[in-house]
Image: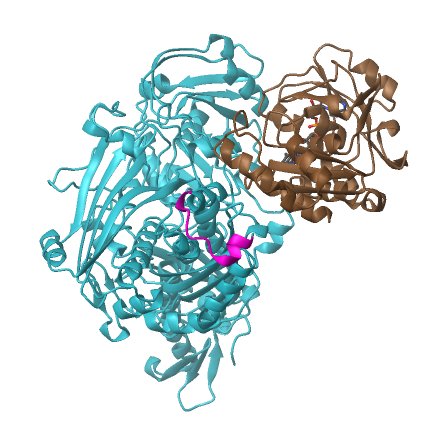
Amino acid sequence: MYAFTYQRPTSLADAAAAIQAEEAKLLGGGQTLLPTLKQRLARPTDLIDLGAIPELKGIREADGGLEIGAFTRHAEVAHSDLVKRVIPSLASLAEGIGDRQVRNMGTIGGSIANADPSADYPSAVVALKATVTTDRRSIAGDDFFTGMFETALEPGEIVKSVRFARPDKAAYAKFRNPASRYAIVGVFVAKFGAEVRVAVTGAAGSVFRAEAFETALSADFRAEALNGLSVEADGLNADIHASADYRAHLVTVMAKRAVEAAG
Amino acid sequence: MANPNGIGASVRRREDQRFLTGRGNYTDDFKRPNMTHAVHVRSPYAHARILGIDFADAAAMPGVVAVLTGADMEADKVGSLPCGWQIHSKDGSPMKEPPHYPLARDRVRYVGDAVAVVIAETREQARDAAEMVVVDYEELPAVGSSTRAIDGGAPLVHDDAPDNVCYDWHLGDQAAVDAAFANAAHVAKIDLVNQRLVPNAMEPRAAMGEYDQSSGEYTLTTTSQNPHVTRLLMGAFVLGIPEHKLRVVAPDVGGGFGSKIFHYGEEAVVTWAARKVGRPVKWTADRSESFLTDAHGRDHVSHAELAMDADGNFLALRVSTLANLGAYLSTFAPSIPTYLYATLLAGQYKTPAIYAEVKAVFTNTAPVDAYRGAGRPEACYLIERLVDVAAGVMGMDKTEIRRRNFVPKEAMPYQTPVALQYDTGDFAKNLDIALPLVDYPGFQQRRAESKARGKLRGIGFATYIEACGIAPSNVAGALGARAGLYECAEVRFHPTGSVTVFTGSHSHGQGHETTFAQIVAERFGIPIENVEIVHGDTNKIPFGMGTYGSRSLAVGGSALVKAMDKVERKAKKIAAHMLEAAETDIEVKDGRFTVAGTDKSLGIGDIALQAYVPHNFPLDELEPGLDEQAFYDPKNFTYPNGCHVCEVEIDPDTGVTTIVSFAAVDDFGNVINPLIVEGQVHGGLVQGIGQALYENCVYDEESGQLVTGSYMDYCMPRADDVPSFTVCYHEDQPCTHNPLGVKGCGEAGTIGAAAAVMNAVVDALSDYGVTHMDMPATPEKVWRTIRDAAPAPTPAMAAE
Ligand SMILES: Cc1cc2nc3c(=O)[nH]c(=O)nc-3n(C[C@H](O)[C@H](O)[C@H](O)COP(=O)(O)OP(=O)(O)OC[C@H]3O[C@@H](n4cnc5c(N)ncnc54)[C@H](O)[C@@H]3O)c2cc1C
């Protein structure tokens, strides 16, 4: 790591002020940022640790759904009785992130701000009609992820919380990369009345909705409704772990499994 | 009375207390006053000419003590890293042995090849400065794989190795094999790749050099499996330091799996630099460096054919292998695809004629050398895959074809057609034990149940035999080894009866501090707490050869027994003197020395005290002291063997393979500590399973860049990837030529497991006409194989 100045503000306002410094970086759970620093791939002048800011913490019921503070660790979401009761699929998604050490450190705010194409949370943000609240505004989940490692956040904007709507039924099915355990393909299926959302992560540069799947499932919420449907392999990610056509195939398989799990 | 901590007791590892509580003392834990830190500048190119190195800016960075390059080493007449084994080609010519300098001089030959070293007050300062070293490279075309290396017109890794060939070697009777094939009723054939692996010891390599100006002595503390070998190679060949001025210490070492046998350039760099800068110099690899520069394992491409008569009896085996040695010859690299591989190609079978050709080539990749099993997993995998193909050709049951061709117990000792002589082994018995363990008769029903759930179930068998101990010096010498292959031990009784053992074996996870102490406790009837095992320091132990090739117990343990024999002989003399009896009348049992037919006796503790308080010794007949040393050079290799059975279930929708069960039946000869043996087998199995399903070291063929340079891409097996193992052994066939009757257990799991898993995977896919798949059986590969095979769908699958 290169040397940097470490700051640990205790209010959102102080953090917002501190992040204005040139080349300052926000520090969530550090599960992406610290390895990057250790490999000397980034050279921030200041690290603004968000871990001591009360406004960024906690899980509450809100508008019938859930509001989760940005600095909430994956393990907290996974083990929260409230999450398990209101949106159990979200708890099980969190339980499937990385490994125990990563879950004990990584945060939801850091995960979505980072917008890794193979991260799990982006699928929930889109499928569960989330709203991302920052220190400046509210951003609809559908508009939040704009590309590979890209979001609608402006420089220095801090994610404060994420509000998820409560679905009637939902499940997340993940095909994990055996090495990193990120998602090679992850499909979040959520049913709100007649509306069904199918959000796919891992497969492409950014999370996307499989509209043909949504239409089919809105008419018939059973795995069989997806028979014969698939997403276009063109443009999907390809690496040594999975080619684009394998990923396209997995999207259908995982979508069916999610529907089955949602019941 | 049996010693509760003696031979055969599952004593818990005494060393674990310090390991599990973070009190181990690893190389990186050592701190010295005034210590400096080294960081290497490494080549980002697989192949390039070094046109110049500009380190003026780096040298001016804060905290920098020195920036040193290959030119400085050349000026100091630092030599090339030596190779410890010479192979001769078919035509009698010696292998190509290009120089391998600790810091590259004019050309770099793999990504990670060291070009310069920066020494600074702190590691971060050294890293900062290393980034400022500007190396002017002229990039050259690279060779990223063995098949590309021999592709006519490939770039040359070394100008003096035409066609990139290091050697073109063979073993066996080609004429006899050709004749047998001419008369064969059936022939089974296979083409397979045994992919390259990264060893991934938990502790990365590290080295600290020190130089004492007043005494002229150097000390190297290093992550080594064999400190004396490093002392000899580095002292005599690289740095020109005589042994009495060079101490090599290998303290606690966090795993090696072979990768820490070898003498590496960084060890020479820190030792040499310590004198140059006049301060201790420490280097610790980070994980990325480990991926790039630890000697890798395996990397074979092979074709094999098996000739059979009409009844499925094996007549002859023909094997041709292309082995990738990487950019330079690592210490024992040439011996791995030859004498540790081709000599094992008989496996457990009485195939009368075998011929193997091995072409070893240079590529622009990290050096390849011994990795757990070293040559023997490659042999086992090839034979056992081929035997499964042969069963298919013959339409025979996979256990039946094996049983039919086993070397029978009665044929022991058995001379194979590929140089080895097996001493003992009852291969049919291993299989007989295994079959009920895995409920083989019930398999078809389990397969049908899986099918009903839309899953594919397969069962795979692998029998293995390995040659361990890495044995008699005279044989090894005749085969090209440039080292002796014995082991040493010293047993020092102290006046109050406690014992310190100095062993040349080195423990880096094997548990010697426990097992070796058990052997001593048993022999002398003393509490295990009274025995201390010392290893890993050339200033303390006699010249030892270290630990690799499952040799610690078979060779090091035998040396220990030999030293204990000497102690006992001496103790007997002392007892005879003290008890005023003839030496011939003294009977010894469990450390008690009794005059035959009387109740006059002494314990070893009394004798030890007398040995150091010799008030009335007849000094011309009896020396004081009770401290004996022995060197043991084995008569033969030892031959652990066994039968592994794996059952898998494949999800055809995703291609994911799940290991449902795994049973290992092993013959390790006598077992000193069942708990440790079981642990060694578990670890070995996981490594073999890792190769079969997960691990794959990938270089880009054209650019020579390492694609799988971190755990994000290089997949290690984890605890939740494997089932609970069924592990058992029998002790019916002890080794006949060492005093403990032991064979070794360190590598066995790795040797059998990969073949067992892959045979199970192929069996699961047999409905699709699949007869082979290369490792690792990744989900995508399995899925694609199923998709492309387009079988007649079974009813259960059609319903899906
Ligand atoms: C071995 C390993 C395995 C993993 N496996 C998975 C997996 O399976 N699935 C998965 O989804 N993820 C996985 N991760 C990622 C991990 O779960 C974290 O979610 C992720 O690293 C980012 O969260 P963090 O809190 O650690 O953020 P950090 O690493 O601290 O920060 C990441 C980025 O987000 C920014 N940031 C942090 N907090 C905020 C905020 N409140 N507002 C604005 N910007 C912010 C930072 O400035 C930085 O740019 C894995 C990580 C590791 C190391």
Instruction: Place residue B107 in its image quadrant.
Output: top left
Chain B palette colour? cyan
Q: Quadrant of the N terminus of chain A?
A: top right
- Residue A93 highlighted magenta (yes or no): no
Residue B355, horizontal then vertical, whole percent:
17, 52
Q: Is residue B31 left or right of residue B317?
A: right
Residue placed most toward the observer, B217 or B451? B451
Q: How many marks?
A: 0
Give the residue at the far front of this rendering.
A219
Q: Is residue B119 left or right of residue B464?
A: right
Q: Indicate the chain coloured brown by its letter.
A: A
Q: Please say if A112 is above or below B759.
A: above
Residue placed most toward the observer, B103 or B249? B103
Q: Which residues are magenta?
A: B788-799
Residue placed most toward the observer, B471 or B663? B663
Q: Residue at x 28, y 37 (%)?
A: B83
Q: Residue at x 56, y 32 (%)?
A: B32
Residue B676, horizontal then vertical, whole percent:
51, 61
Say whether residue B284 is visible: no
Q: Please say if B261 is above or below B576.
A: above
Q: Is residue B643 left or right of residue B605?
A: left
- Residue B789 highlighted magenta (yes or no): yes
